[in-house]
């Protein structure tokens, strides 16, 4: 009887551990290259961009950003714009929607730069129930944008 009680206790403990196991988290790095588009853009600010992401851990696919908010930056940083919007990553094994909030119009040696923080909002496929974030550092060119992303994605 004591052996059965011990086995029952161990089985219950293992089941509880599996139920409360922490998500699998992985560091992700990548490069987004995108261009602004207007046809079909649903942004109230008239800014949408679409392109590709090429990252590690099979984080490769297409991107679409729809800005849903923008305000002028502080007077101490003239020409800047604080922005927010939803960016959708469409990847081979699912989608990931992030809230991107950032600051654009930064100037460095005549180059236009931007920075942002992306926080996971929702996902599908492999990314259903995911959480995580990315830090973004980018540059605006005459005909496209390039942004490095670095962060962590956790899946259940």
Image (tube, rainbow, N blue to C red):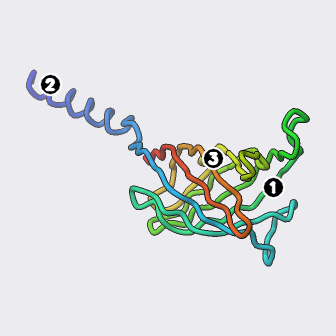
Between marks 1 and 2 in the image, the one whose residue lies nearer the viewer: 1
Say whether residue 84 is left or right of residue 127. Answer: right
In this rendered view, identify the residue nearer to me: 46 or 146. Answer: 146
Name the residue carrying label 1.
Answer: 68
Alpha-carbon span between mark 3 and mark 2: 47 Å
Name the residue carrying label 2.
Answer: 6
User: Residue at point 85% right, 50% down?
Assistant: 70
Disc 2, SS = helix
Specify the quadrant of the image occupied by residue 13: top left
Say whether residue 61 is left or right of residue 38. Answer: left
User: Residue at point 56% right, 57% down?
Assistant: 96
Specify the quadrant of the image occupied by residue 76: top right
Q: Are marks 1 and 3 in contact (CB under 8 Å)?
A: no
Q: Position of residue 154 (x, y in %)?
A: 46, 45
Name the residue carrying label 3.
Answer: 118
How many numbered marks, from 0 up? 3
Q: Position of residue 132 (x, y in %)?
A: 53, 43
How packed mark 1 is, by other alpha carbons closer than 10 Å (few <14, some 14-19, many 20 or more), is some
């Amino acid at each position: 009887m004591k052996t059965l009680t011990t086995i029952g206790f161990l089985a219950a403990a293992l089941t509880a551990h599996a139920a409360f196991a922490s998500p699998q988290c992985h560091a992700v790095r990548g490069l987004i290259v995108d261009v602004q588009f207007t046809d079909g853009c649903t942004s109230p600010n008239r800014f949408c961009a679409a392109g590709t992401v090429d990252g590690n851990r099979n984080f490769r696919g297409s991107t679409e950003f729809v800005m849903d908010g923008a305000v002028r930056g502080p007077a101490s940083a003239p020409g800047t714009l604080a922005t927010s919007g939803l960016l959708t990553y469409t990847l081979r094994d699912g989608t990931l929607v992030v809230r991107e909030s950032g600051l654009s119009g930064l100037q460095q040696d005549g180059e236009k730069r931007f920075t942002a923080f992306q926080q996971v909002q929702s996902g599908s496929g492999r990314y259903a129930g995911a959480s995580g974030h990315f830090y973004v550092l980018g540059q605006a060119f005459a005909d496209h944008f390039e942004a490095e992303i670095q962060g962590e994605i956790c899946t259940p």
